[in-house]
Amino acid sequence: MTFTLPKLAYNFSDLEPWIDAATVEIHYSKHHQKYCDNFNAVISKYPTLSDWPAEEILKKINEIEVSEEDRTQIKNHGGGFANHNLYWLNLGPKKILDAALLEEINKNFGSPEKMREEFNKKATALFGSGWTWLVRDETGKLRIYNLPNQDSPLSIGHTPILALDLWEHAYYLKYQNRRPEYIENWWKANRLVS
Ligand code: MN3
């Protein structure tokens, strides 16, 4: 199996004004594509993994029989591939609110506002390149945390729900050093939670 980028359900310009068209285009067709290509290159060395979905490979990152150097490659580029898949899926020009998710958020955080507050606090505090995550942990509880680089929550047994890319390539063209503004506007482009 060769991994390919999921087709976006919207045009590059559809997330304007929150995320600009140039950023979406470069992020998707250059950055995301590069993770995908590098992931394919490393997986092509291991025919036993060729039928596995990316998510399964990341879940078993510490068990799969690969060289340590390639494990790092898979973590970085497989993570980059899968993380961006979710990033694009979270976004959209039209809100399609997920009622079951909202109920879970209310149960775990009290309200979407409280969840966003905690999420934004974590996102603003992230040092360097990485992602802020809303995940469901192994007990079913929702949690918010940061992971560095392209590390995936799947690799620690969690199911990612919301994925905020905080690498500078995700926002620098439009927002430069104004990361908090990007974070605020990312919520506006997020179709799952208002
Ligand atoms: Mn990115």
Image (cartoon, grey):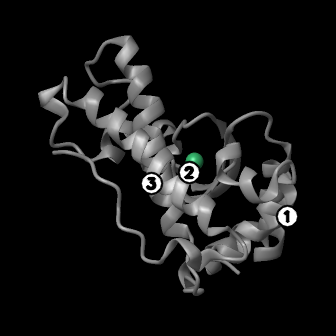
* Viewer-closest of 112 and 106: 112
Q: Position of residue 103 (x, y in %)?
A: 63, 80
The amino acid type, in three-letter code, at marker 1 is Glu
Marks 2 and 1 sit apart, C-alpha to C-alpha, by 20 Å
Q: Amino acid at mark 2?
A: Asp
Q: CA distance from mark 3 to mark 1?
A: 31 Å
Inspect this view and state whether residue 191 appears: no
Local SS, label 2 = loop
On the rendered structure, is 78 left or right of 51?
Answer: right
- Residue 25 located left or right of residue 66: right
**Extreme left residue here?**
47
Q: Is mark 3 within 8 Å of ligand 1?
A: no
Residue matched to label 3: 29
Which one is nearer the viewer's eye here, 193 or 127?
127
Sequence-first disc among 2 and 3:
3
What residue type is disc 3 on?
A: Ser
Q: Residue shown at 51%/64% (left/top)?
A: 88
- Rate crowding at label 1 as few (under 14), some (14 to 19) or many (20 or more) other CA atoms within 10 Å: few
Q: Which residue is mark 2?
A: 137
Give the Cα distance between marks 2 and 3.
31 Å
Q: Name the element at disc 3.
A: helix
Residue at 70 percent of width and 47 percent of height: 166
Q: Please determine whether, in this image, residue 192 is positioned above or below residue 52.
A: below
Residue located beneath label 1 in the image:
117
Mark before the other along the chain sequence, 2 or 1: 1
At label 3, counting other C-alpha atoms closer than 10 Å, the crowd grade (few under 14, some 14-19, many 20 or more) is few
Determine whether the residue tagged by mark 1 lies in a helix, strand or loop.
helix
Relative placement, left or right, of 103 versus 88 is: right
Q: Nearer the viewer, mark 2 or mark 3?
A: 3
For label 1, being within 8 Å of ligand 1 is answered no
Quarter of the image for the N terminus: give it.
top left
